[in-house]
């Protein structure tokens, strides 16, 4: 892959960006200090970009009893199973940033089992990782374990949805060799 | 799970459905003869439902050089790896319906390798299944195999996106024990 | 594989069938309405055919406290792990037929864990599937779980024998690309 | 398991042995110097014993272009994947005995890939092991590799049948904790 | 590999052996009746040989509350998972020799779960095998299971160190196709 | 685990450190700016510490045609498969430091396949990772692939030895829940 490219695919349309998309990117630049490469990768098609950002924003940023950090920890624990360079980099940075604990981010990337988590957080990540590795083996007992740890059924939906979403994005990134923004690596170390 | 329920989760909000959602469901009923249970499962939250249907409709129904049947075959081959009852049922029916070949639907559910496919279709499903099973091991050679089979880089994006999407929905369905509409089972046999 | 062939192997002897075998096939035709392709595949050698049918008939049809439906459910749950097109098709049809419940057949094919089974049936299938996936890890605790679910030691023998048998036939079918009779697909839907 | 028992199952009928079975056992004793424990395990039911021995004798002893040693090597290579104590012990002894090469028996038990085999034998065992580990992934290319190594389609049937048979017996042995005759351990060392 | 060679690698320096190494080999010959091939494989470099033997001797022969037989059983159970011909041969012989029970050695090679062990030994081997197969999934509960079985924390260190060491040597042997001394095969049968 | 502890094991002897060990630690402190926690973990027993450091120093620091960076990349790629928190942290820092390329260190931790390596480095890491995941499946073809990439047989020994060593240390760290020095996390970012 040539230096500076975002994916291994040549998608011609990617060269022109709609005004709407440009506005969205300007907001990202202002709020985050960068436009996440995943958005640029989707920019070749406005509808696909919008579908992706709508789902992402709802899952990761909308109201939920799961904290944003919880959701980012799920993202990274799932991406660790799938060895996804893009998502581990971008969301590893988010865990470091949201927690103010650089080592916690590293632990999520490397092996979430070593982190000093609450029993509830541990149950959440155990579920997310089992759902990633052996979805067919999830049974009522697994849902009950989350309820026993204090989660509501709505929380279970949210945990499942975030874990499932990163099983999607990990694979889009793997299939296209998507590269994260360089800035993430040094962020919140 | 009580007879007639769609998932194993109790999501109170699901009882009231917005006017927008009701309109959408009415259209489904008219066009498909049923409201897919996955939509009812998401109906507890309008934004989540909309994010899901926007992505689904773009991936599975929008313009693409991949035929709708190709996309449904990917959906089923991926869901077979993950043993997802919901998606195998709903999308197995779609393969039977779109192909007019009930046995093709069964083959996708059971083992896509036995189907008498073109070399191009076979390459497409081999990629989708490797991406499902071992996303971390996808390398440039895997993308090149698709190009050699006649796919453009844009096609690779679409193959990857559909395969990735079902890796998400398979897990939402597994996590919630989502049940498909009864009608799918007898459809297009 | 050319249309209409039963396996990917050319076994010359298969063209002539002994009088004994013809009689057996006539009985199948009369009783089942078809001669199962697996029998035609073995017909190139009378002794092999006889050895196969003797074992099959004893395991699947002879007296046992396991019902015929129980045995067919084991057959399909095992074949689902092994993704065996022949056995999933033929024995999926048998589950639909014996249970009068088409959806139960689909569940066994797709993921037996979603079926609404008795605790005893669930223990039976859990054992059969563990025996299929990790035979070396079966320990006394696994046998005890079957006893605790109400099975006798003789029942354990029968469960094990049926599960083991389909681990054989799944592999004969896979190795030869054996094709099931077309009729199974629409049977008992 | 009490010392001297053959399986972990208590099958009452096993105490009385029919005259036919006794005759068969007498022949074993005379020819082999022992009655293989697997036969005693099946002796609780004459029909099951007969079905087992008919299939075993056809596969392992009847005319075939595969030598008896070839068939025993397949048996052991398959049983090594499945870590089957009974079959590794009994058929490991057979490989040592038929080859006159004690180390060859050990290699089959431990890792067939270290043995100094002909390319044809290696292709045979590679197929048997793939069929054992990933039956769903066997494709025409795997059969062609056997043909390219000099095997006929009939040979492929025999290789597949022996490999498949031991995938059955390995699981009967695992499920019942079947114990091999003590004599095998020191045989042909 | 040519008959008589110890590994598949040509390491020129291996032809000359230092005086120190020769002395060490003389002691081996006297004490064991042979110079283990692994030592000859390392003999091309005195420092590497010394580092290997120092670690080996400390782990396998030094004072520990684990008996030498315990340590050899760990060695073989680990090597069975990894299908290591060299280590299964050499350390299988050691288990036969130290226990005076040839069948115990075979059981460790084939499937340690069939052996009639104390609960403590079983816990020890279960830990060693989990550490071999899924090191990332070892959690405090696994250590506690060893403590509950009567092991001290120091014992856990020793169990872990031996299991880990054979995960190293199994891979050196696999990578180089290392061959055990012929004498091991018939030893202590 | 209490804050500040290095492993989850209480090894009483660890409280007193020999004069020799103290001297060694002083050198580490001076040269590296820290005493690696793995050394403190082994400090409860001088002989074990010495055996470990002798092997480590020979493999990672002694003369070899493999550069120190090559060896550290192997260490991290292996540790990524095994999800070893300690080794990924300590040796990820070493890759960042030796290469002067912080992103390269992250890539080795997350998925070595995304790194822009020479064909020779890629062959080296592919071998190390196969040796880690499937040691029993290493065959002459795998060694030949290294020779074809320009490695000598002696290089193969070194690649294998380093990969094997980290398969050991990953497991000692996993078994004991060993914690890396905090300093590594921010080093060479």
Image (spheres, coloured by chain):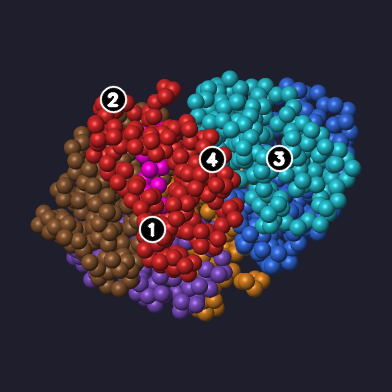
Chain colours: A brown, B red, C cyan, D blue, E orange, F purple
Label 1 crowd (10 A; few <14 / some 14-19 / many >=20): some
Q: Position of residue C58 (x, y in %)?
A: 75, 31
Question: Badge 2 is on which residue?
Answer: B15
State which chain disc 4 sits on. B
Which mark's residue is nearer the viewer, 1 or 2? 1
Q: Earlier in the sequence, mark 1 or mark 2?
A: 2
Toward the viewer: C107 or F76?
C107
Toward the viewer: F78 or C58?
C58
Q: Which residues are magenta?
A: B163-178
Place residue E25 in its image quadrant: bottom right
Q: CA distance from mark 4 to mark 2?
A: 32 Å
Quarter of the image with the N terminus of chain A in it:
bottom left
Q: Position of residue F28 (x, y in %)?
A: 23, 63
Which mark's residue is nearer the viewer, 2 or 3? 2
Q: Are marks 4 and 2 in contact (CB under 8 Å)?
A: no
State which chain disc 2 sits on. B
- Disc assigned to residue B64: 1
Question: Tag 1, which secondary structure?
Answer: loop
Question: Tag 4, which secondary structure?
Answer: loop
Quarter of the image with the C terminus of chain A in it:
bottom left
Label 2 crowd (10 A; few <14 / some 14-19 / many >=20): few
Label 3 crowd (10 A; few <14 / some 14-19 / many >=20): many
Question: Badge 4 is on which residue?
Answer: B188
């Amino acid at each position: 892959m040539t230096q500076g490219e975002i994916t291994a695919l040549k998608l011609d349309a990617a060269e022109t960006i709609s005004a709407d998309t440009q506005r969205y990117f300007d907001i990202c630049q202002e709020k985050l200090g960068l436009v996440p490469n995943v958005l640029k990768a989707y920019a070749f098609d406005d509808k696909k970009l919008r579908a992706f950002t709508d789902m992402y924003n709802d899952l990761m940023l909308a109201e939920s009893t799961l904290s944003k950090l919880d959701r980012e920890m799920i993202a990274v624990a799932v991406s660790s199973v799938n060895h996804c360079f893009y998502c581990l980099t971008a969301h590893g940075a988010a865990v470091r940033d949201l927690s103010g604990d650089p080592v916690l981010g590293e632990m999520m990337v490397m092996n979430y089992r070593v982190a000093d988590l609450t029993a509830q957080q541990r149950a959440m990540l155990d579920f997310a990782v089992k759902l990633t590795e052996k979805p067919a083996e999830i049974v009522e007992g697994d849902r009950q374990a989350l309820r026993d740890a204090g989660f509501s059924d709505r929380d279970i939906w949210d945990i499942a949805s975030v874990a499932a979403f990163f099983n999607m994005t990990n694979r889009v990134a793997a299939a296209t060799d998507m590269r994260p923004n360089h800035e993430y690596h040094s962020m919140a170390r």
